[in-house]
Amino acid sequence: MNKSLAHLPQQERDRFDLLRQAYVGARYHEDYKITPQELKYLARCAELLREQVETSCETKMASFV
């Protein structure tokens, strides 16, 4: 696990790992399969991650002012 994620709650680290596994599977394995339900769940995970990154970046940028 990436050290930069160590501070996150386990649920968040698990969600990120699931997204990483899906990316690697879809990118590098021709036989990768995903159900519509799994895809919907991963899309929500990706949205949550995007929101967290946005918040973190805004907070960091505000600290430079």
Image (cartoon, rainbow, N blue to C red):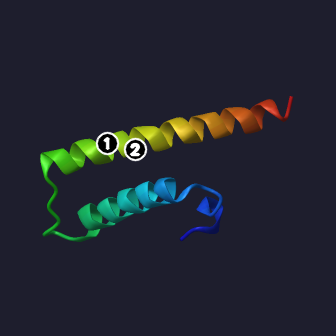
Q: Quadrant of the C terminus?
A: top right
For this rendering, which residue is in front, 56 or 37? 37
For this rendering, which residue is in front, 14 or 62? 14
User: Residue at image x 21%, y 50%?
Assistant: 38
Spot the residue most to the front: 10
Residue 10, percent from left and from top: 52, 60
Residue 26, percent from left and from top: 25, 61
What amino acid does circle 2 point to? Answer: Ala
23 relative position to 56: left or right = left
Q: Secondary structure at mark 1?
A: helix
50 relative position to 64: left or right = left
Residue 33 picture quarter: bottom left
User: Residue at image x 44%, y 60%?
Assistant: 14
CB within 8 Å, label 1 to label 2: yes
> Where is mark 1, residue-wise?
43
Q: Marks 1 and 2, Cα distance to the nearest angstrom?
A: 5 Å
Q: Which mark is residue 33?
A: none
For this rendering, which residue is in front, 25 or 51? 51
**Vertical comparison of 4 with 28: above or below:** above
**Vertical comparison of 41 with 24: above or below:** above
User: Residue at image x 47%, y 55%?
Assistant: 11
Mark 2 Cα shell of 10 Å, populated few (<14), some (14-19), many (≥20): some
User: Residue at image x 37%, y 56%?
Assistant: 19
Spot the residue most to the right: 65
32 relative position to 55: left or right = left
* Total marks placed: 2
What amino acid does circle 1 point to? Answer: Ala
Mark 1 Cα shell of 10 Å, populated few (<14), some (14-19), many (≥20): few
> Where is mark 2, residue-wise?
46
Residue 31, percent from left and from top: 13, 69
